[in-house]
Amino acid sequence: MLLATVSADSRADDAEPLNIFAGQGVTFDSNLFRLPNGVSPSAAATGVTDPPRGETLFNSYAGMGFDKPYSLQHLHADFTFTHYAHHTYKFLDFDGITGLAAWDWSIGKRGTGKLSYDRTHTPLN
């Protein structure tokens, strides 16, 4: 099995509390469906005439990150939106989101806690 990945990313200065980023990637997988040697994907199952074993996957993503301490408090958030596009198997295309927002709070040195929200929507769940 051959798996190759190339990606590009652009981010703001990590010293800033708010960072906005975007990027693109491309991956080639020589055996997308993990079939045994000598077995090819079925045209009926994939909806593709003469389906190949390998596939090129493109992903584009954009998001933001926020990380700022305020005295004994700490606020941080990360959200990323990703679009996955397949060259041949279009039925596998997908839009995903991952996100986390959290407040690490403190009242004095003894009263601490964390309030957070986490969201993930990917092709695997």
Image: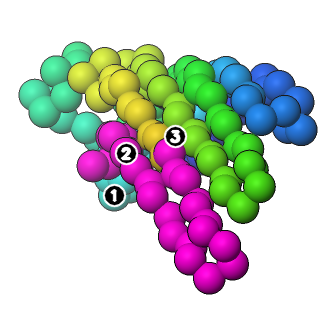
Q: Is residue 22 left or right of residue 46?
A: right
Q: Is residue 98 left or right of residue 22?
A: left
5 or 1: nearer the viewer: 5
User: Residue 114, image x and y in percent?
Assistant: 50, 64
Residue lying at 61% horizontally and 67% vertically, measured from the top left: 106
Mark sitting on residue 36: 1
Which amino acid does the dot numbered 1 rest on? Pro
Q: Is residue 38 magenta?
A: no
Sequence-wise, which precedes: disc 1 or disc 2?
1
- Whole-Å distance between the Cαs marked 2 and 3? 28 Å
User: Is residue 11 shown to the viewer in this render?
Assistant: yes
Tell which residue pokes out farthest to the left in this image. 44
User: Is residue 1 shown to the viewer in this render?
Assistant: no
Q: Is residue 27 left or right of residue 84?
A: right
Q: Identify the magenta region.
A: 101-125
Quickly name the residue at label 3: 29
- Whole-Å distance between the Cαs marked 1 and 2? 35 Å
